[in-house]
Image: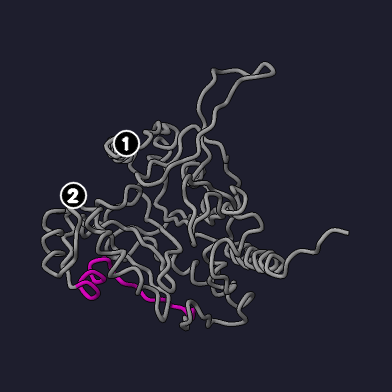
Amino acid sequence: MSNPPSARKFRAVRARNALYSAIRGYFADAGFDEVETPLLVPAPGMEPHITAFETRFVPEMGARGPERPLWLHSSPEYAMKRLLAEEWERIFFLGKVFRNGEIARTHNPEFTMLEFYRANLVDGPKAGRGYGPILVDIEEFTLRGAEALAGGTKIEWNGAPVDLTPPWDRLSVAEAFASRAGIELPLDGDAALLRARAQERGFDIPEAFTSFDDVFFAVFLTAIEPGLGWPRPTFLVDWPASMASLAKLRVDDPLVAERFELYIGGMELANGFFELNDSAEQRRRLEEEQRFRASLGKPVYPIDDRFVDAVGRMPTAAGVAVGIDRLLMLLGGFSSIDETLLFPACEEMT
């Protein structure tokens, strides 16, 4: 007779199924279509600090075309934006994505992502942040998940209470640096000025950290991120323009990108944008990221021309990627991503 499943694994499976049901139920009620996108893609995302798993297509059985590289997608974004360009208005993806080298308490190289988009949203300074409806979506399906897994709107994370009752807090990146690190953030991306201001406040910035992003995260990861999302979730909004390769810039302030991240209990759960829909600008940004990846000694991926073309045909839209395993940790009371998985990488690779 085989051994029964462990109590932890059984609880994890039941909790995951309950969360998926809550998410799918919300999106069905809100008029979204669930879509599947390819896991193997001819060009992965170009984010400088993400490495994709590479494989090769070898033609057999009369297949056409040459042998060529393919990658496991790190996000369904490129494919979903092609659907937006074909006039899909509300779509979501709930499935596996892959990122090489990521194994930690909140990372697994194969993990579950929720990505969704709303099209034909209102743009312009009078409308406020264009991605506003997306924030409400996140609040509402998380609330449903909390009620299903935790029995209400209050949870405990790392020994402290978190109240999930909407609406959640909104905090700009500049406000976070000013209030939590005592630094006036130069939104124009001036790395030298940010370094000087950080050192004046007593931050030890390594000499090798020369870029704006390097100095930014040296401060952010130590002085700001751990305190975000207590005692309520926090949407961190209005990012420096240089730090949002797929987002529009604010109409009323081109130094600020319409990007947001969600934090609950000091942990990042989501990254979203009011989406760029200018093909020429998108290609320029991707080419800049190619050069940056090369300077870091990382693989330089090809540009997906079908994606770039689709960006120029997209309506105004907002979208977000949500780490579902992390959300399951929070709502289900699991201490690490491994506890939410039947086959975590740390066990399968030993």
- The residue at which mark 1 appears reads as 297
* Depth check, front residue: 324 or 338: 338
Q: Is residue 242 above or below residue 225?
A: above
Judge from the rendering whether residue 338 lies leftward or rightward of residue 172; answer left or right: right
Residue 92 image position (x, y, % from top left): 55, 54
- The residue at which mark 2 appears reads as 210
Judge from the rendering whether residue 44 lies leftward or rightward of residue 150; answer left or right: left
**Total numbered badges shown on the rendered structure:** 2
Of all residues, the one furthest to the right in this rendering is: 1
Residue type beneath disc 2: Thr
> In this picture, which residue range is highlighted in magenta?
163-181
Query: Residue 168 colored magenta?
Result: yes
Judge from the rendering whether residue 342 lies leftward or rightward of residue 173; answer left or right: right
Residue type beneath disc 1: Gly
Q: Which mark is residue 307?
A: none
Please report whichever mark, 2 or 1, sits nearer to the chain's N-terminal start: 2
Disc 2 to disc 1, how far (Cα)?
16 Å
Residue 275 image position (x, y, % from top left): 38, 51
Q: Look at 57% across and 43% down and name the residue there.
A: 37
Where is residue 310, by image quadrant?
top left
